[in-house]
Image: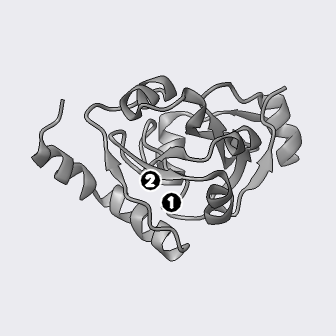
C-alpha cells in the first residue's frame, strides 16, 4: 500500500500532469485517482475500484504497419488482431514491445492513458465499453486512473468506435 505522500507524488507525476492537461484541453475534467497498488491488469484495477472488470478501459498499443495504434478495449475480453487489422486497414497488427509503447506514448505499459502522448495516436474504442455508465481509464502512471464514459473516450481521443472482438 502507498502512503498519502506517495499518492500526492503519483498524482504530481509529469505523465499524470500531461494527461490532466490533455483532458482539460479536450473539455474533460475528471478527478484522477491514485490507486493503493499498481493495476497491471483490468481485474486488479476493477478490484481496487469496486467495479466490474468490463468497465475498465484497457489501453493497448499495437504496432500497426509500423505506426502506433491505441485500442481502448473493455477489460472483459481480448481484442482480436485480425479484427483490428481490418478496422485499421492494415496489413499487420501486433502487440507492441515496451520500447515502442514508451516511444509513442511517453507512458509505461500498465499506465498508458487514452491521451497525453507526444503526438496524437490513432485510436479505436471498443463499443463494449458503451454498456457501462462509467468506465475507468489509466492516467499515465500504473497507479492512476480516471472515470469517464464511452462517449467521452471517443470524443477526447478522436477515436473510432469498433467491436474489437471476433
State left or right for residue 17 relative to residue 115. Answer: left
**x and y percent of residue 37 in the render?**
28, 31
Instruction: Name which quarter of the figure residue 151 lies in.
Output: bottom right
Secondary structure under badge 1?
A: loop
**x and y percent of residue 38 in the render?**
33, 32
| Residue name at image x 75 percent, y 36 percent | 93
Q: Residues within 10 Å of mark 2 (few under 14, many from 20)?
A: some
What's the colour scheme? one colour
Residue 29 is marked as: none
| Residue name at image x 83 percent, y 38 percent | 85
The disc, 2 or 1, on the residue closer to the chain's N-terminal end is 2
126 to 140, vertically: above or below: above
| Of the pair 137 and 49, the residue shown nearer to us | 49
State left or right for residue 100 relative to residue 73. Answer: left
| Residue name at image x 26 percent, y 54 percent | 11
What is the CA distance from the residue labelled 2 to the residue labelled 1?
A: 6 Å
Secondary structure under badge 2?
A: loop
Q: Quadrant of the N terminus?
A: top left
Residue identified by numbered label 2: 106
Instruction: Name which quarter of the figure residue 26 lies in.
Output: bottom right
CB-based contact (under 8 Å), mark 2 and mark 1: yes
Q: Quadrant of the C terminus?
A: top right
| Of the pair 27 and 122, the residue shown nearer to us | 27
| Residue name at image x 67 percent, y 41 percent | 129
Q: How many marks?
A: 2
**x and y percent of residue 72 in the render?**
64, 43
123 to 78, vertically: above or below: below
Residue 117 is marked as: 1
Q: Residues within 10 Å of mark 1 (few under 14, many from 20)?
A: many
| Of the pair 130 and 87, the residue shown nearer to us | 130
**x and y percent of residue 145 in the render?**
41, 46
Amino acid at each position: 500500500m502507498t502512503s498519502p505522500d506517495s499518492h500526492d507524488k503519483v498524482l504530481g507525476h509529469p505523465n499524470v500532469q500531461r494527461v490532466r492537461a490533455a483532458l482539460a484541453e479536450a473539455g474533460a475534467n475528471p478527478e484522477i485517482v491514485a490507486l493503493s497498488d499498481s493495476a497491471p491488469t483490468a481485474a486488479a484495477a476493477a478490484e481496487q475500484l469496486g467495479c466490474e472488470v468490463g468497465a475498465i478501459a484497457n489501453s493497448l498499443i499495437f504496432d500497426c504497419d509500423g505506426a502506433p495504434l491505441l485500442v481502448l478495449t473493455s477489460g472483459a475480453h481480448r481484442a482480436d488482431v485480425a479484427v483490428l487489422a481490418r478496422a485499421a486497414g492494415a496489413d499487420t497488427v501486433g502487440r507492441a514491445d515496451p520500447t515502442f509503447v514508451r516511444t509513442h506514448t511517453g507512458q509505461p505499459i500498465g499506465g498508458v492513458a487514452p491521451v497525453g502522448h507526444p503526438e496524437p495516436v490513432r485510436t479505436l474504442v471498443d463499443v463494449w465499453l458503451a454498456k457501462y455508465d462509467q468506465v475507468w481509464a489509466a492516467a499515465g502512471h500504473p497507479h492512476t486512473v480516471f472515470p469517464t464514459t464511452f462517449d467521452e473516450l471517443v470524443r477526447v481521443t478522436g477515436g473510432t468506435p469498433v467491436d474489437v472482438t471476433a
